[in-house]
Amino acid sequence: METLQKLGRMPIALTVPAFVLLLVVFGVPIVQLFLTSINAPAFSLANYHAFFGQPSNVRVLYQTVEMSVVVTAICLIIGYPAAYLIVAASKRVRIALTVLVFIPWLTSGLVRTYAWIVILGDHGLINNLLLNIGLISSPLELVYNRSAVYIGMVHIVLPMMILPLLSVMLGIDKSLMEAARSMGARPSAAFWRVFFPLSLPGVRSGTLLVFIMCLGFYITPAALGGLRDAMLSTFIAAQVSSSFDLARIATSAFILLGTAAVVLFMLGLDLSGNQGIAVQSTRASRRSKLPSLGTLTRFLRELAIPYRAKRWRSQLYRTMGDGSWWKMVGTVFVVLVVFFLLFPGVVVIIMSFSAGAFLEFPPSGFSLQWYHAFFNDPAWYGPAWTSIQIGIVVAILSTIVGTLAAFGLSRTFPRLRALLTMLILTPITFPVIVVGVAAYLGLVKLGLIGTISGIALAHSIGSIGFVVVIVSATLANFDRRLEQAAMSMRAGPLRTFTRVTLPLIRPGIIGGAFFAFIHSFDEVVITSLVSGLSLRTLPLKMWENIRNEIDPTIAALASLLVLLPVLWLAALYFTWWRSRPTAQLTRPEPATT
């Protein structure tokens, strides 16, 4: 009891387990990687000179940045109007569309990559359709090229662009747009002068998340691209599996990490919107340095005042019938975006019931043969059971450690909380291949390479970040006066936490546990580095099968993994729904007279 009271007075101590795990598995090895890259203790840049001295390395680095920029730009062009239209929809439609965007994000990236192989392959959906119609005489080369890589990468990271934009746009006061319109501003002017600057934090967050994730892409370019579409992460993974030249690996990893750091420095990650205000003030100060141009602009605006006033009076009471066309265009656009996100999963589910010897769409008959093949083949259900075991261990460990860390961070000073939170989230903000190499070095020292415990520890350093984010968001809406009321009635810290705090934040804890499990169950890159040769998880088995031969059994497995996020969301919803009566019972009843 005295220990709990001391922890109550020092909540920062609750973050110690999380930081110990991060330091041992990730922090110390990443420092070791950096020192190796600069030839410590000699401290030279010879490794970096050697990297940039080879034209092939420079070409791969340029290609990595180029592909990441292109994918990020495509996601921004598609994601911003999609998020804007989703926010403008009614509440029920908005919730439904958000869930439909959220489901693909939770679906295995390996499954989505496999789905595009099925759709774009020589005997895939598109080529078969065109051949049957008679538009082509031989299959088109739709896969194993740069275009296929772009399609697959955009499909995987597009939800990561839309979701941050949605969170920011939902917080924008719509009355500001109405005020701008009442002052005579055109819809386009009101959007660009009012709404867009306020949405810039979401643009920065989505752009940064998508770009950094694209830098670490390994599976999708290797599966959908050709030899000319290799990225730096593929180069690092090849070095790890072949020569394991630690100096070259460390140099390549920190060049990739430095690229991400440069983008982070350029964009920043301020969600408060102050950067947008700062940008506007900077532009205003620049315009003030050009008095002649400013005078001419003001003169032209004064000349246009009578025309603008007349136009405003004429349109003030005009009906909005002309907006039906744009509303229809927006509806079609959102439907196409959702169709793009969901269609590959639907194709895989339908093809998994094929009765033929090969996958075909539409199936010639209905059969469960591929599901029977999965559940009756130890080569498939063995790795699946291994992945389930690892996922359960990761979920338990990450939930306990992450919840303690979130609880401690919520009761520390804001500046210290921001710094510690950034450190905990480092493994999910770094390129995944860099995290994998660091985790490999950390587990080598612990002697846990090729063990379930080692893989679970490697997965946990990222899963803890997800738990901290979700539980912290739940604690942000928690009324601490309930704890104070319990303590005033002589309840101890442990009893207060178990009887008051824990029931109210339980949905966040359960959500964090589900996120941790799914993150572990779907992990491929880190697992491929730390699993050794004797242990195979289900994603690794799928990846080997995709690279060597397309076994139709994988379609049945992929369909099960597509349905997993739906079951997860349903379980989370019912958990939250069942927790509502508990939350309502803890609220004080209003006084009656």
Image (spheres, helix red, strand yellow):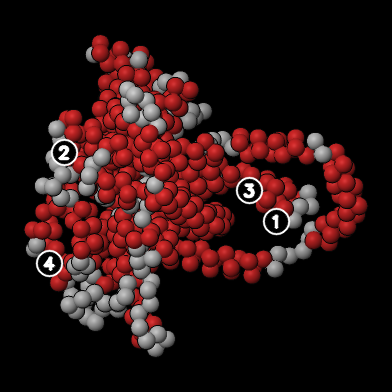
Q: Are marks 2 and 1 in contact (CB under 8 Å)?
A: no
Three-letter code, disc 4: Ala
Instruction: Give left or right: position of 27 versus 207.
Output: left
- The residue tagged 4 is 373
Find residue 129 and report its horizontal and vertical position in percent: 36, 81
Mark 4 or mark 2: whose residue is earlier in sequence:
4
Three-letter code, disc 3: Phe
Toward which corner of the image does residue 369 lie, by quadrant? bottom left
Residue at left offset 68%, top offset 50%: 192
Query: How many numbered discs, if any?
Result: 4
Q: Which mark is residue 449?
A: 2
Circle 2 or circle 3, nearest the eye: 2
Q: Secondary structure at mark 3?
A: helix
Please state which of residues 48 and 384 is positioned toward the viewer in this rendering: 48
Alpha carbon distance from label 2 to label 3: 49 Å
Mark 2 or mark 1: whose residue is earlier in sequence:
1
Is residue 293 placed above or below 550 in the rendered structure?
Answer: above
Three-letter code, disc 2: Ile
Q: Secondary structure at mark 4?
A: helix
Please state which of residues 120 and 365 is positioned toward the viewer in this rendering: 120
Three-letter code, disc 1: Ser
Q: Are marks 2 and 3 in contact (CB under 8 Å)?
A: no
Please state which of residues 292 and 371 is positioned toward the viewer in this rendering: 292
Residue at left offset 39%, top offset 51%: 56
Alpha carbon distance from label 1 to label 3: 10 Å
Mark 4 or mark 1: whose residue is earlier in sequence:
1
Circle 4 or circle 2, nearest the eye: 2
Q: Secondary structure at mark 1?
A: helix
Find residue 245 and report its horizontal and vertical position in percent: 26, 40
Residue at left offset 36%, top offset 19%: 12
Alpha carbon distance from label 4 to label 2: 31 Å
- The residue tagged 1 is 188
